[in-house]
Structure formats: structure tokens, C-alpha cells
Image (spheres, helix red, strand yellow):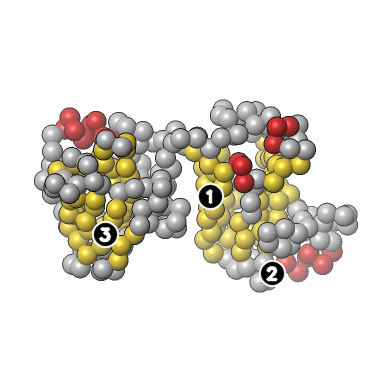
Amino acid sequence: MKRVCAILVAAISATALYSGQSVVFDGELNFGLTDGRLVRQFQPPYDWSKGELYRRVVVTDKPTDLNIAVCLCVWSGGEACSPSVCFEKPGDYYKMTRTEWWWYKSGPNSMSWGGHGTRGYVLRDGCPSGRWLATMNNSYSHGPSAAEHLPVKMKLTEIFVPFGETFECPDGWTDPEICGGAVDTRAPDRKAVASARSRVDVESLAGGIVRLSAPGARAISLVSLQGRPVSSTTCDQAGSVVVRAGEVPMGTYIARAATAGGMRSGLVIIRN
């Protein structure tokens, strides 16, 4: 792959590669017989009233095929709950939400979004709504019959992206909608339409060749998911470059291009 001068690579890689996103939770959740809600305390250093929350849920243990949901609720001068991640079987699930999509009790203006400290992950017996999936006897819980559906165990990761910034998928995240249309070079003649957040067009051709396009760009760079520059190639007049498997190590990369309309990005998988 033809390299351009180091100055160009440095200029592209320094432009909001990390997007200011923060991991706000990354850990195991184990919903037992009385756990309709698992509470976590934290003080976010950012304004939750604006931005996006990206969530990956890897369900590892689920005894029945009941359609259930997990959501995030916060309490601070009011109550707000995010849209749910729904699942019937163990597997890998993804969700992106914005705070304006959340359900509010007492209204959004009652929330102290800048510093709420009480948050709970609520497991419900239906999707999108239902009672807490817990054996407790009260008006908001499923009751003793919940025991056959528990325990439910999962690994949950949540990433907050401030308003106006661009989400960069972590290593291992594979959902094409969340991650901007990743294309596998082993699948020829397949084109991913870039999302509003990832606007470098990625086209997989036969023979392990990928065409990256960003009209108006002078060069397109590949960086690792951790932000490490890998390569940069000068574009043709149409703003396109061609990447061949073998010219860069196999793996998943972020394609970056600076244009007059701003920075464009996209996700691409390089495989033989």
C-alpha cells in the first residue's frame, strides 16, 4: 500500500479519533431469584441530558425461552428508564439509545442528569414492558413463578458518547448497524451503506479487495480500533482507494478521511 507523508497521517489521526467516549459500565450481571434490579452507584463526569448510550449484552445463562428485557433506570430527582435490550436465548445483543428516547416519570426536567448517582439494571418478564422478573411478592414483581426463568447471567458493556461526537466500535463488537456497516472481504460483491455516524463507503470486491470511498478526500487512513495509525493511501479523483488483503495485517480497522464537509469514518474487516 502506498504511504503518504507522516504529516498527513498525524493530521488525520489527531482529529477526534477517540470521540470523547467513556465506558460507564463493563462487568457481569447475575439476576438471581430476588434480583429484579441490580443497583450500581456512580457519578458521571458528563451531561447525560445529551448524547448516546451504546450497549452490548452477552447473555451467557438463561434457563427458559421467555422473552425478557433488561433496561437501565436512573433516579435523581425523578426516574428515567432507557429502551430495553430484548432476548429469548443466550447470545450477543446490541442497542443504541439517546436520552430523548427514554421513559420519564415526573418529566425529563426533573432529572439531575449531570450528577445522578443511583442507577439500576432492571430485568422484566416481557418486552418492551412488564413486571420485574423477581420472586418477590409485590405489585411490580413477577412473583414466585419467576423462579423457573432464573438465574439470568450476562456480561454488559455500556459506552457513553457525548453529543456531537462519533462512536468508535470497540474491538470485538460485530453488530453492523451499531458499528457502521462492517464488510467482510470474504463476501464478494457486497456493499455496506454507511450510517449517519460512519460515512466512508466500504465496498467488498472479489479476491479480498476492498474499495473505500469518501468524495472530496485527499487520502484515506486505516487506524486500529484502539486508535493506532496503520496506513494511509492517497485517493484518486473520485475520492477512492483500494485495499488488498495482504497489504495490511488481517483485522478490523476504522477508515478515516478528512473532507471539506468534516471527518468521515467507517468500519472495515480485512481478511483473505
Which amino acid type is shown beneath numbered disc 1? Answer: Met
Where is residue 179 drawn, in percent x and y? Answer: 41, 52
Residue type (three-letter) at the residue carrying disc 3: Glu
Pointer 1 local density, CA inside 10 Å: few below 14, some 14–19, many at least 20: some
The answer to whether 202 appears left or right of 49 in the picture is left
Q: Quadrant of residue 53?
A: top right
Residue 251, percent across and down?
A: 29, 54
Mark 1 = which residue?
A: 96
Find disc 2 in the rendering and name its residue: 66
**Earlier residue among tags 1 and 2:** 2
In this view, 89 is above or below 83:
below
Label 2 sits on a secondary structure element that is loop
- Establish if 9 lies above or below 125: above
Q: Is residue 26 visible?
A: no
Q: Secondary structure at mark 1?
A: strand
Measured as percent of width and height from the top left, residue 100 is found at 61, 42
Cα distance between the residues tagged 3 and 2? 39 Å
Residue 36 in sight: yes
Looking at the image, tell me whether mark 3 or mark 2 is earlier in sequence order: 2
Which residue is labeled 3 in the image?
203
Residue drawn at point x = 60 percent, y = 34 percent: 49
